Image (tube, rainbow, N blue to C red):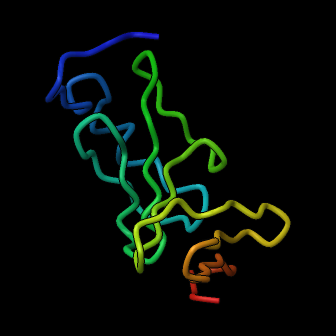
Amino acid sequence: MTTRPAGHNITRVISKELLDILACPLCKSDLKPEGEKLLCTNAACGCRYGVQDDIPNMLIDEAERPCPKCGKQRKWEPETDSVSCPACGERFAWQRGKAAKA
């Protein structure tokens, strides 16, 4: 795995064309670069995807899934296409065509 200096911005290694077609696998929203990660633009979802060896890792189960309510890591529940927070109970589920709080 490639190590980058602090403050590295992924837009130097990921083209704008690729960013334009990538979407959050959980809620299907656009992604934007934030430091060394790709951040989902849907605040209720908020998944952050890492980039390893200049390749976006778009696996939900390996993403950072911070709870917008308390900040704790949410648990991915693939059988219901949702994430839930074990600390505060906040739950987010993707529904066809839209994302919704569950």
For the point 35% across and 65% down, which residue is it?
41
> Residue 91's image quarter?
bottom right
For the point 28% across and 22% down, which residue is it?
13
Residue 6 position in % (x across, y down): 17, 24
- Residues 25 and 85: in front is 85
Residue 34 position in % (x across, y down): 25, 46
33 over 26 or under it: above or below: above
- Residues 2 and 88: in front is 88
Left or right: 42 in relation to 78: left
Visible residue check, residue 92: yes
For the point 46% across and 47% down, which residue is it?
22
Left or right: 81 in relation to 23: right
Tally the numbered discs.
0
- Residues 11 and 87: in front is 87
Visible residue check, residue 98: no
For the point 41% across and 80% down, which residue is it?
69
> Residue 85's image quarter?
bottom right
43 over 29 or under it: above or below: below
Residue 94 position in % (x across, y down): 64, 76
